Amino acid sequence: MMVMSFDEMLPLIFIGLMGVSLLVYVVSDGYDLGVGMLMHRATPEERDTMVASIGPFWDANETWLVLGVGLLLVAFPKAHGLVLSELYLPSALMLVGLILRGAAFDFRVKAKAARKAMWDRMFIAGSMLASICQGWMLGRYISGFGEGWNYPIFAGAIAVALPMAYALLGATWLVMKTQGELQEKAIEWSKIAWAPMVLGLILISMATPWISETVRVRWFTLPAIIAVAAIPITSGVALLAVRLLLGTPAVRGALCWLPFVLLVLVFFLSFLGLSYSIYPFVVIDRLTVWQAASSPESLKVILIGVCVTLPVIIAYTGFSYRVFRGKAIELDYA
Amino acid sequence: MLMDAVFLARIQFAANITFHILFPSISIALSWVLLFFRLKHLRATDPQQKVDWLRAYRLWTKVFALTFALGVVSGVTMSFQFGTNWPGYMERVGNIAGPLLGYEVLTAFFLEAGFLGVMLFGHRRVGEMVHLGATFLVALGTLMSAFWILALNSWMHTPAGYEIVDGQFHAKDWLEIVFNPSFPYRFVHMVLASSLTCAFLLIGISAWQLLKGVAMTSASRVLRAGLVFAALTAPAQMVAGDFHGLNTLKHQPQKIAAVEGIWETARGAPLLLFAIPNDATRSNRFELPVPKLASLILRHDPEGELKGLNEFPSAHPPVLPLFWSFRIMVGTGILMLLVSWVGLWRHWRDGWDFSRMPRPLLTLFAGMTFAGWVATIAGWYVTEIGRQPFIVSGLIRTSEVASRVPSASIALTLAIYVTLYVGLLAAYVGVLKYMAEKPDKSTASVMSEEFAEDPHRYQGRGEFA
């Protein structure tokens, strides 16, 4: 096997860091975007509890997006220019959605009571807009920004599937964080969102190799297919387990956390599969990590910062989740 | 149509940073003020005082939460716009700008966001010391964020510690890059600007509460604290601003020449109180000069020489916006100094009793709630427009690095952003007014009933310990 120098490995380390940041973003903001989208099915009182369940976290969740995009910008400036020029409009619309929901989140309880319903609508609309745009962007990105009749359909399908995945994630988050009537509703919502999400995942897994030659070769040749088959198989088992759990009484009690955790596992495996498809490209078939990377000196400077701060960030994020563990209760500034 | 895209990209970026800076300019200082309120509450022995500081803390925590959220969402937008609006910038100076931005995210954003939840909502779940610690870390995070972003911004004005290889910038000395020649001045100037902005927000909203007769005892304490805060920081800001100006004269003389409206190099240059500079004729109309004062201020010598814009052909900023932004900034600054000192003096004459303070003075306080915003934005326009036509002073022109996105897309998103920003700003101001008038309206997402009825009876852990 070829031995890489440390300088050659740096871009790989950074693509890994960027990928992990975006994965953490998708999972963590995914559940709070999902909760936001589900709010249109809830009563005003339930909405308060739903917001309370994500209140202490959403801010930090969005920071992972800043880190992910920041790392793309900092470590792969050429890819950043290419990707964000291609995705200019959807990314701008996503930002509009994120701004709307972030602002509405804080305004809804501080403005006049009569305005609360309006801010709730903004919160729901912003969450949907951001999720749909992210789905579209993911679809365009996976297909390497290809041109042709099939590409927009592919991106459009993911623009529907990803919000469904977020909704399922959000619903299982609520199963974990709430009780009583709202928890019952959350279980129902999870069941509704389950099928479209699974369908979307299957669609992506089938369409990606169809759209990209590179991906096809990588997955469907021996012996690779045997080794990597573990990814879809485990995902399938986890998704089935989620569906089965939702039908059992245990999900209302001791195992309320399990569907959410299993879904996080599915997201992680999908991420692994996607990484395997794309490696070593930043933009599939167009730009490899080495072509796109910044100078090694700068990457080293950032890497030192990452090594020092990331464990601390993980520690205090864990601390925050521990402080707000258990069922969501009233949330007020005390 | 490249110029159009550059122009639109600049307007869009300017709109976004103008909207964004409004919120950090409050939250940088307000986070420390909250820590102060909390400590006052904990250390007060008199029960009325204890309740007053607690109410002040509650109200201003709500203000902080709202301000912080708007800062975050507009900041996320900025992290995208660096790349979408100025792709060439990162490709050229990414090796220097990248690590600075990276460190801001890693050391500041996560710290703020990570502890914000505990600070805002965690009081009944953690001990008093842990909560104070979380508040302190959020405050520290906001300050660190200012540190990194101003290090990068200052480097763009006074680049240092770099070398250029094949058109790409490479870092040579990180200490020189971070502590570049204008950084200490700009950092101090910005932190003081935030302090003044926050102080006048405290003054304005508390005065409004006194005028409306709500939360009188609590508002009085906050108003007094705000007046003292403003009276101390306003003169400090004048001194810091003067040093910053001298530093700019040394490194960016073309910016000073534009600020002072000096077209030709002159000895004993006058200070123009009023003028309408004209870039086309390269002269001023309707000048109202004070002889030799500009030389005296900038050279500390009435006959000192000041370089004119003629020394920087095709490389100096537009004069009119700089000239007027600077005068608006200084004018607002002087007004803030006078109002805080007169207010404090009058308050002392009244025996520290706000019920004896004339209503017109309270109305003036309320009218100046957002005076800090005016001065801060005007100041940022001076410094940022003053760097034009360069994005990195003297080295890279803004037009070289601009977006390749079609101008129609930029125009469309610009229209959406501006509509959104105007709407949110109106909502922000409206909600501040509403919260000031109804400070005890609980923001509990799920309200416990006895708390809604009587905030005084509510005892969280450690509240009255």
Image: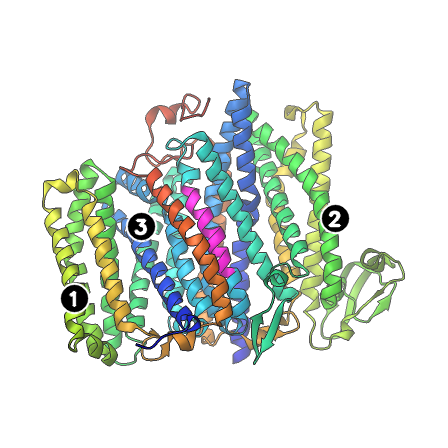
Front residue (pair B447, A320): A320
- Type of amino acid under label 1: Ile
Spatial CA span between label 2 and label 3: 47 Å
Q: Which mark is residue B239?
A: 2
Task: Tell whether A242 sits left or right of A140.
Answer: left
Crowding at mark 2 (Cα within 10 Å: few <14, some 14-19, many 20+):
few
Q: Find disc 3 in the rendering and name its residue.
A: A32
- Does dot 1 land on a helix, a strand or a loop? helix
Instruction: Give yes or no for contact between labels 2 and 1 (Cβ–Cβ under 8 Å).
Output: no
**How is the model colour-coded?**
rainbow
- Relative to residue B366, is residue A156 drawn left or right? left
Residue at the image point whose x is 17% and y is 42% from the top:
A255
* Callout 3 touching callout 1 (CB < 8 Å): no
Taking the spot 20% from the left edge, 52% from the top edge, the residue there is: A262
* Chain for numbered disc 1: A
User: Which amino acid, by three-letter code, is at mark 3?
Assistant: Asp
How far across and how far down the image is residue A57, in percent? 36, 46
**Position above or below: B332 against B265:** above
Our reading of the magenta stretch's main secondary structure is: helix
Q: Position of residue A329 (x, y in %)?
A: 30, 35
Q: Magenta stretch containing residue B106, yes or no?
A: yes
**Image: magenta residue range:** B101-117
First in residue order: circle 3 vs circle 1: 3
Secondary structure state at the residue bearing disc 3: helix
At which x and y percent is residue B197? 61, 45
Q: Residue furthest right?
A: B303
Find disc 1 in the rendering and name its residue: A202
Q: Chain of mark 2?
A: B
Q: Residues within 10 Å of mark 1 (few under 14, many from 20)?
A: few
The answer to whether B277 appears left or right of B295 in the picture is left
Can residue B391 be seen here? The reply is no
